[in-house]
Amino acid sequence: MRLTIVLVVGVCLLLAFPAEADGDDLYRDTLVGLPGLAVVVENISNGSDALRDEISVMAELALRSAGIRVLTRDELIRSPAVAYLYVRVGLGAPRAMQIYTVEVEIRQSVTLANGRRAYGASTWNAPNSFGIAHEASINAVIRQSLAPMLDRACNDFLKANPRTPPSLKPTSARKRDPKIEEVDPEPVSNAQP
């Protein structure tokens, strides 16, 4: 009987939360042209400030490791997009087994149909993570849940804003002065000392 209930609940969850297509272009396109991202981690209810700081450092490190510029607060405010990576962790009441949720979004300012600007609109998000973990391991479980979400955010940001390696950047062809060609037609590599 219990196995049947578990299977029914599992199927309902799969139907309620269908797998997203990898790299949804509609949402990824909202990231095009962003100069970088600031990191905002919401205060964690029933959590510690140390966990919040760990999450903030983890998010900044993920962005920097991917080559994405982490905007300071001043840069964020001056940026037209006001774009930031938003992380929210929710914890249930402290018990031996604790419920948690993890959300990762990229938020930015948008222009509404009436011409007004709205700030903090979610334009991209990773599928949310949730579960139950033992109180002693809750911080590690949250970090494990957060890592692939940050990877996905970085990957989609980089797909929207591809970086050209310096070796592949087009160089401007310098025009040679025809007078120099007349004076020294021999290539330098063939010159004798």
Image (cartoon, rainbow, N blue to C red):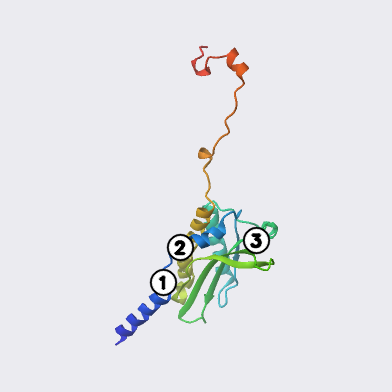
Residue 35 rendering spot, x and y as whole percentages: 61, 53
Q: Residue at x 59, y 28 (%)?
A: 174
Q: Position of residue 149 (x, y in %)?
A: 48, 64
Q: Secondary structure at mark 2?
A: helix
Q: Earlier in the sequence, mark 3 or mark 2?
A: 3
Crowd around label 1: few <14 · some 14–19 · many ≥20 (10 Å): few
Residue 6 picture location, percent across and down: 34, 82
Q: Earlier in the sequence, mark 2 or mark 1?
A: 1
Compared to residue 132, the image places residue 59 above or below, namely above
Residue 82 is labelled as 3
> Circle 3 — which element?
loop
Q: Amino acid at mark 2?
A: Pro
Name the foreground residue: 26 vs 190: 26
Q: CA distance from mark 3 to mark 1?
A: 31 Å
Q: Which residue is mark 2?
A: 148
Q: How many marks?
A: 3
- Asked if marks 3 and 1 touch (Cβ < 8 Å), the reply is no
Q: Residues within 10 Å of mark 3 (few under 14, many from 20)?
A: many
Circles 2 and 1 in contact, beta carbons < 8 Å: no
Q: Which residue is mark 1?
A: 18
State which tag comes first along the sequence, 3 or 1.
1
